Amino acid sequence: MAEATPQAATAARLERLRRRMAEENLEGLLVGSPANRRYLSGFTGSSGWLLITADRAELWTDFRYLEQAAAQAPGFEIVRHEPDVYRHLGRRIQELGLGRLGFERDHLTYAQWERLRGALPEKVEMVAVGGWIEELRRIKDPAEIAAIRQAARIADEALLEVLADLRPGVTEREVALQLEFAMRRRGAEGVSFDLIVASGPRSALPHGTASDRVIEAGDFVTIDYGALYGGYASDCTRTVVVGPAGERQRRIYDIVLEAQRRALAAVRPGATGAEVDRAARAVIEEAGYGDHFGHATGHGVGLEVHEGPRLAANGRDDVLAPGMVVTVEPGIYLPGWGGVRIEDLVVVTENGGEILTRVTKEFLQLAVS
Ligand code: GLY
Ligand code: MN
Ligand code: MN
């Protein structure tokens, strides 16, 4: 069982959330999404609700999690809910006399909304709340950064181990399995997403999760992977060539690397996500491959592998600030031929960015025998 998030951290988070609730005249907020629930309470179980008011913090869960919840969320009163949690919550909300009740608009399903609405007295106003907790999560505290740093370190070491053995004849799936094993052996709780191992022409698939394709000499292999540590994700991509590379492979790699360097140099407090994206995209466009870089340059990483801020053309309002952890991951993808992506994880500091993923970005041509 994971340890509780230190109570001082969750108390500070609740305090900030309550300030926002007061500003928006919310008397209560229901939080059910796993990452937000964990962020606010420390509870890692798969099922539960937080009911937060100006002076109460309750964690509602079922029999399976009572002991765990009490250990992980000491700042919360643990409530064992009845089988129909909505009816039970409805009674409680009535008992507390809450008038305006917030719910997470991005996470509550329509069916859940209907059940909750049906269980609440008519006079209770249900207020859709979008992204408040996600906004708090953008800026990491030192313990969160330490967890991400450790996830990145585990991932770095595991990749070096796997690259040392990577030869033609193995399947992408075997490489992914070796990588997961190497990360777990080093203390990872798991992988931060389905690992991407995309070789040869499949490297043109930006999200080519590992398949049964056998890796051949001369292939590009794009490995996009991450570890989970203390609940926090890492995210890194390296593209290598198995055996001697062709001229075009080197050229495309150099363009992506230069785009990535420029974007990394643009990471600093006050820069917008759109500016960092532009820095990478300008290099790729100038080289004539703009149409082959169709995804964003990066994203925030934390309890979830994809969270705010956006480093994308539409990220004008995503202003970088110290404590944010973001990826920088431009790529070029040429259908039928292959592709290259290079991705680092960066923590925004007071005057720039510190790269957490340390595996070399030199153009690697792996030995084939
Ligand atoms: N693997 C997903 C990403 O790098 O964003
Ligand atoms: Mn990635
Ligand atoms: Mn990423």
Image (spheres, helix red, strand yellow):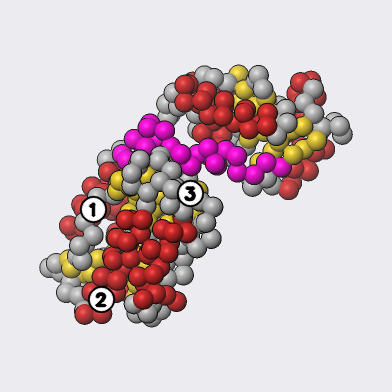
Residue 42 visible in image? yes
- Closer-to-camera residue (196/334): 334
351 relative to 367, above or below: above
Quarter the C terminus occupies? bottom left
6 relative to 223, above or below: above
Residues packed near mark 3 inside 10 Å, few (<14), some (14 to 19) or many (20 plus):
some
Q: Main secondary structure of the magenta part?
A: helix
Q: Amino acid at mark 3?
A: Val
Magenta range: 128-150
Q: Position of residue 192 (x, y in %)?
A: 41, 48
Mark number displayed over residue 319: 3
- Closer mark to the observer between disc 1 and disc 3: 3
Q: Which residue carries the number 2 mark?
A: 251
Residue at the spot x=29%, y=48% of the render? Answer: 355
Is 340 left, or right, of 167 in this rendering? right
Mark number displayed over residue 359: 1
Quarter the N terminus occupies? top left
